[in-house]
């Protein structure tokens, strides 16, 4: 055997229970050829083998981000005003003003990533059209909250969007639009600012480079806006057909295309190892940040607000069964306890014998699960697709979760420990808030409350084999084994030895499909 790449002198955590640790790996083409000790791998090398001394660094399978908005992240990286570090409403508006003065745009002005729960002082309410108009009034402005469930827009944008009271989430107070757009109303903004195909292709390439820096080699892309799947499929297929797609992508779609996919017989899993059809993405409620997650107890500052229920129960049950019967996996967004109750009940309506299929239905986010709901999900054999980064962003004492629901309630939010102990398959994703598995793994391991904490091995598994299983690809990716696709990463530090510092660790090397695509020392 002659290897193309040999990596030796490593601490390889393989995710293979039969051989959990190894020292070296050999790659031929796009596949792992050998996993073993350094001496055996060196014996299989020739003069043409590219040799990499790992210097005892930890090697892992490439991370699988099981819940992203990947193309949208690329568009944001390329084009949007980054508002993630804004420290107050005043700071945000000043950044907007200076950006417009500097760049002199002629069309839509888009800002993204702001999070009022992180503002250090002053007014922490959502922006209004009047407030935005003070700094920019002659161009349409849309400012997207970090979770994507709220846009704050100015008067010019409201005029262009032509919204009316029939649009759910179009906020009106005292007979006047506030400029705050939630849930359904946000889709009008996305349609107005949608990137064209060339911009989308460029955005996917930008997002891919960013993913490689973070050790991500596979993504499950979730859609929000109705036309997004059609546009994304064209863009990803363009890259795939030219052999330029540098990420394994599983694409999820919205209900508006379900009938046409069924009509042509397209079901989950269609495609190859790089590009596949995922399944049907449904929203049943909004977000905690936008105060639209569907909850039983109401929000701390407004107990009358229970959030938004986005589906009638019977309509949701019918749609989910239709998808299931057509061989299409379900990926259902449910955050609040009431939304989770609705989704679990609808899944329970699918006949038990039919659940034991390759579809592996998923519930996305699961932030406010109860113990009883965990037990029911286990009985359903459904997958929980969760974002441990949310705990670090908003779940620490004093942060947004506590602001929304109080201290006692936050101690059992994102209950990862319950999930794993309950025997449920757990897949981790980032939702791009922020993108980066090591940040998520850190907070799964170092979460503040016992119900949320996992071991390092359990957290890493959720970001590798968990995502592979959720995408029905565990025979191809998710572990380092002979015959599997060669998606591998090296870390600069050992998360098993220093779990308190995982979020500060860096990816040193990323190999995708048997090719080195990122080295930390190459810029």
Image (tube, rainbow, N blue to C red):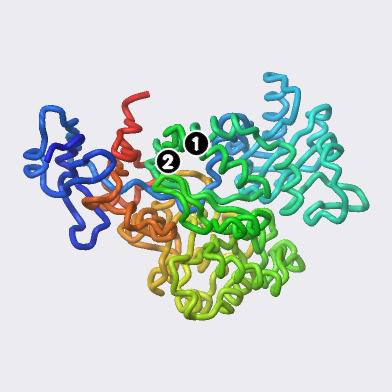
Q: Position of residue 478 (x, y in %)?
A: 33, 53
Q: Can residue 388 be seen by looking at this rendering?
A: no
Q: Secondary structure at mark 2?
A: loop
Number of residue marks: 2
The answer to whether mark 1 and mark 2 are in CB contact below 8 A is yes
Going 10% across and 32% down the picture, which residue do you hit? 46
Left or right: 221 as drawn, with respect to 489: right
Which tag, 1 or 2, sits closer to the chain's start?
1
Q: Residue drawn at (27%, 56%), measured in percent from left and top?
A: 15
Is residue 216 shown above or below 309?
above
Residue 247 has which mark? 2
Q: Residues within 10 Å of mark 1 (few under 14, many from 20)?
A: many
Q: Residue at x 42, y 70 (%)?
A: 424
Please state the horizontal and vertical placement of residue 426, each as a whole percent of the image.
Answer: 42, 63
Mark 1 vs mark 2, foreground winner is 2
**In the rendered view, does 231 fall on the left or right side of 47?**
right
Mark 1 to mark 2: distance in Å?
9 Å
């Amino acid at each position: 055997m002659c290897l193309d790449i040999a990596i030796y002198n490593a601490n390889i955590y393989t995710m293979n229970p039969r051989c959990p640790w190894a020292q070296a790996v050999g790659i031929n083409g796009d596949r792992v050829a050998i996993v073993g000790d350094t001496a055996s791998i060196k014996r299989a090398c020739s003069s043409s083998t590219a040799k990499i001394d790992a210097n005892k660094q930890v090697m892992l399978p490439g991370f699988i981000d099981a819940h992203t908005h990947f193309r949208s992240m690329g568009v944001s990286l390329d084009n949007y005003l980054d508002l993630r570090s804004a420290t107050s409403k005043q700071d945000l508006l000043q950044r907007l003003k200076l950006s417009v003065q500097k760049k002199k745009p002629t069309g839509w002005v888009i800002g993204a990533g702001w999070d009022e729960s992180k503002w250090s002082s002053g007014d922490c309410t959502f922006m209004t059209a009047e407030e935005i108009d003070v700094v920019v009034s002659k161009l349409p402005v849309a400012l997207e909250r970090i979770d994507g469930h709220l846009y704050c827009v100015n008067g010019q944008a409201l005029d262009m969007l032509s919204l009316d009271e029939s649009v759910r989430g179009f906020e009106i107070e005292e007979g006047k639009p506030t400029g705050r757009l939630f849930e359904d109303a946000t889709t009008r903004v996305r349609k107005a600012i949608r990137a064209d195909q060339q911009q989308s292709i460029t955005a996917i390439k930008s997002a891919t480079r960013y993913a490689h820096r973070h050790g991500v080699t596979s993504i499950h892309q979730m859609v929000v806006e109705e036309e997004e799947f059609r546009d994304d499929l064209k863009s990803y297929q363009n890259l795939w057909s030219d052999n330029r797609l540098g990420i394994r992508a599983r694409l999820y779609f919205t209900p508006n295309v379900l009938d046409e996919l069924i009509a042509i017989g397209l079901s989950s899993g269609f495609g190859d190892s790089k590009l596949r059809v995922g399944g049907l993405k449904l929203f049943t409620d909004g977000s905690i940040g936008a105060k639209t997650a569907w909850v039983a107890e109401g929000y701390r500052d407004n107990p009358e607000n229970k959030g938004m229920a986005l589906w009638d129960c019977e309509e949701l049950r019918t749609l989910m069964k239709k998808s299931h019967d057509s061989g299409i996996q379900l990926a259902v967004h449910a955050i609040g306890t009431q939304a989770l109750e609705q989704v679990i009940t609808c899944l329970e309506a699918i006949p038990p014998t039919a659940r034991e299929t390759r579809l592996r239905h998923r519930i996305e986010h699961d932030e406010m699960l109860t113990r009883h709901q965990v037990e029911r999900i286990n009985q359903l054999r459904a997958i929980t697709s969760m974002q441990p980064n949310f705990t670090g962003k908003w779940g620490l004492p004093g942060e947004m979760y506590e602001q929304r629901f109080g201290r006692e309630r936050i101690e059992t939010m994102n209950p990862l420990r319950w999930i794993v102990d309950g025997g449920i398959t757990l897949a981790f994703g980032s939702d791009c808030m922020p993108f980066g598995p090591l940040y998520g793994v850190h907070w799964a391991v170092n979460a503040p409350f016992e119900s949320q904490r996992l071991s390092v091995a359990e957290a890493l598994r959720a970001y590798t084999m968990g995502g592979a299983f959720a995408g029905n690809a565990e025979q191809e990716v998710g572990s380092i084994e002979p015959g599997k696709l060669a998606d591998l990463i090296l870390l600069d530090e050992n998360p098993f030895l220093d779990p308190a510092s995982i979020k500060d660790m860096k990816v040193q090397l990323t190999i995708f499909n048997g090719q080195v695509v990122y080295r930390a020392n190459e810029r």
